[in-house]
Structures are given as structure tokens and as C-alpha cells.
Amino acid sequence: MKHIDLTSIDIQAANDLVFDRLVKEKERQLITGISKAQAFQLERLGEFPRRRRISNRSVAWLLSELLDWIAAREVVISPTEAKE
């Protein structure tokens, strides 16, 4: 196995080294914080990662795509906005 020195690597590069995995519905809801219906609606509009069919009755999402979707929607609220 190839040794990788992570002490001199930036965070994004380290994130790229993480192995991707499939996420099922229950965990997807915990990760994204949106309902099944809202995720389906956003997916139909092309604004949410597409599901992967893993069997006749089961779907899943790639964790990396969900995390990218979240990162693209991060909003920083200033302390003055939070008080309003």
C-alpha cells in the first residue's frame, strides 16, 4: 500500500482521499436535513444529487455528492442577521 504523508497536504486534497460510499434514505435525511418529498422534488428539477438504483426496491446516494450539495448551499449568517 502506498504511504501518503498527510502532514503537508491541504484539507481538500485530504477529502479527495476519502473513499466514497452509498447512503440510504434514512441517513440521507440526517445528512441533508430535508424530507424525502423535498429531495425528490429538487432532484426532478436537477438541483439535488441523483439517486442510484442498487436493487429493484432500493436506492442510495453517493456521500460525496451529498456533501458537495451541502457545501454549495452553505450560508454564513452574521451575528446581526441572527438577532433579527
Image (tube, rainbow, N blue to C red):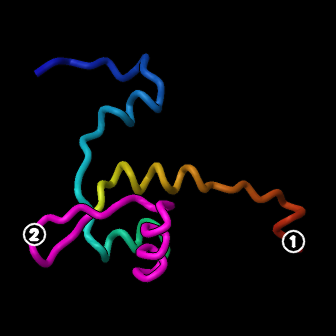
Quadrant showing the C terminus: bottom right
Q: Which residue is mark 1?
A: 83
Q: Which mark is residue 40?
A: none
The residue at 82%/57% (across/down) is 78
Q: Residues within 10 Å of mark 2 (few under 14, many from 20)?
A: few
Spatial CA span between label 1 and label 2? 47 Å
Residue 22 in the magenta stretch? The answer is: no
Residue farthest toward the front in the current orientation of the protein: 45
Quadrant showing the N terminus: top left
What range of the chain is rendered magenta? 35-60
The residue at 35%/61% (across/down) is 50
Q: Which of these two is toward me, 45 or 68?
A: 45
Relative vertical location of residue 17 with respect to residue 33 in this rendering, above or below: above
Q: Amino acid at mark 1?
A: Lys
Percent position (x, y) of residue 26? Answer: 31, 76
* Left or right of 57 on screen, residue 40: right
Q: Nearer the viewer, mark 1 or mark 2?
A: 2
The residue at 42%/21% (across/down) is 9
Mark 2: which secondary structure? strand
Mark 1 vs 2: CB contact within 8 A: no
Percent position (x, y) of residue 35? Answer: 45, 80
Quarter of the view holding residue 4: top left
Quarter of the view holding residue 40: bottom left
Q: Amino acid at mark 2?
A: Ser
Percent position (x, y) of residue 53? Answer: 18, 65
Residue 49 in the magenta stretch? The answer is: yes
Q: Which mark is residue 55?
A: 2
User: Closer to the N terminus: mark 1 or mark 2?
Assistant: 2
